[in-house]
């Protein structure tokens, strides 16, 4: 009789613990699902204009690409269902240098990103500004500036520093 009581108590405990464990697993799975967030952002050029058709990649902390997207006409992209962690987001498009941003995703999500692509041509010429020129300024086709040249034309009777007619 005592054995029967122990056996019944053991079975009752098992019947109680199995559903409890299953519900704990379900709760954990639900929390992991709800903890996943979206990474959103915009790809622009150096002037802040949206870039359509840029390839945007999401890389985990090991450097493995875990998702890819394309920017839309407004330059926007989204990576839905991303688990919390630290990621690198890269944007690339032909004739532009690759842009990279690091994003931290928490259970609350992440801030929207802006990836600004720089023109490869700007990088080949030393960046955004023009290099200072040595010597005289050169006129460029379509330039409205004129190159002025002063040459003495003999004695004009003009003396620098004196006003006309004050002799």
Image (spheres, rainbow, N blue to C red):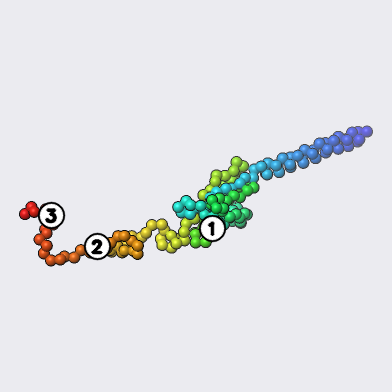
Residue 6: x, y in percent?
Answer: 88, 35
Q: Nearer the viewer, mark 1 or mark 2?
A: 2
Identify the residue at horizontal 83%, vertical 38% (top origin). Answer: 15
Of the image marks 3 and 1, the number of the one nearer the N terminus = 1
Q: Quadrant of residue 141?
A: bottom left
Position of residue 80 in the picture relative to residue 98 (left or right): right
In space, the residues marked 2 and 3 are separated at their CA atoms by 22 Å
Q: Is residue 63 visible?
A: yes
Q: Quadrant of residue 159?
A: bottom left
Identify the residue at horizontal 13%, vertical 54% (top origin). Answer: 161
Q: Nearer the viewer, mark 3 or mark 1?
A: 3
In space, the residues marked 3 and 1 are separated at their CA atoms by 62 Å
**Structural crowding at the residue carrying mark 3, measured as other residues with C-alpha within 10 Å and reported as few (<14), some (14–19) or many (≥20):** few
Is disc 2 placed on a helix, strand or loop? loop
Position of residue 83 in the picture relative to residue 99 (left or right): right
Of the image marks 1 and 2, the number of the one nearer the N terminus = 1
Is disc 3 placed on a helix, strand or loop? loop
Q: Nearer the viewer, residue 43 or 65?
A: 43
| Quadrant placement of the C terminus | bottom left
Residue 126: x, y in percent?
Answer: 41, 60
Is disc 1 placed on a helix, strand or loop? strand
Badge 3 is on which residue?
Answer: 161
In space, the residues marked 1 and 2 are separated at their CA atoms by 46 Å
Q: Nearer the viewer, residue 84 or 73?
A: 73
Residue 113: x, y in percent?
Answer: 53, 48
Identify the mark at residue 92; answer none if there is no mark.
1
Badge 2 is on which residue?
Answer: 148
Question: In the rendered structure, are the residues bearing label 3 and label 1 in contact, judged by CB atoms less than 8 Å apart?
Answer: no
| Quadrant placement of the N terminus | top right
Identify the mark at residue 44; answer none if there is no mark.
none
Position of residue 95 in the picture relative to residue 28 (left or right): left
Q: Nearer the viewer, residue 141 or 112?
A: 141
């Amino acid at each position: 009789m005592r054995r029967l009581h122990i056996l019944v108590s053991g079975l009752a405990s098992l019947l109680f613990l199995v559903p409890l464990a299953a519900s704990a697993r379900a709760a954990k799975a639900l929390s992991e699902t709800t903890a996943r967030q979206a990474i959103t952002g915009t790809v622009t050029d150096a002037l802040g204009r949206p870039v359509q058709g840029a390839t945007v990649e999401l890389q985990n902390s090991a450097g493995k690409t875990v998702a890819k997207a394309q920017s839309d006409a407004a330059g926007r992209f989204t990576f839905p269902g991303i688990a919390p962690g630290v990621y690198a987001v890269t944007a690339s498009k032909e004739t532009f240098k690759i842009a990279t941003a690091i994003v931290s995703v928490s259970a609350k999500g992440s801030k929207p990103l802006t990836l600004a692509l720089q023109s490869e041509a700007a990088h080949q010429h030393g960046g955004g500004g023009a290099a200072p020129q040595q010597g005289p300024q050169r006129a460029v086709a379509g330039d409205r500036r004129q190159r002025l040249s002063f040459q003495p034309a003999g004695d004009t009777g003009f003396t620098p520093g004196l006003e006309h007619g004050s002799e």
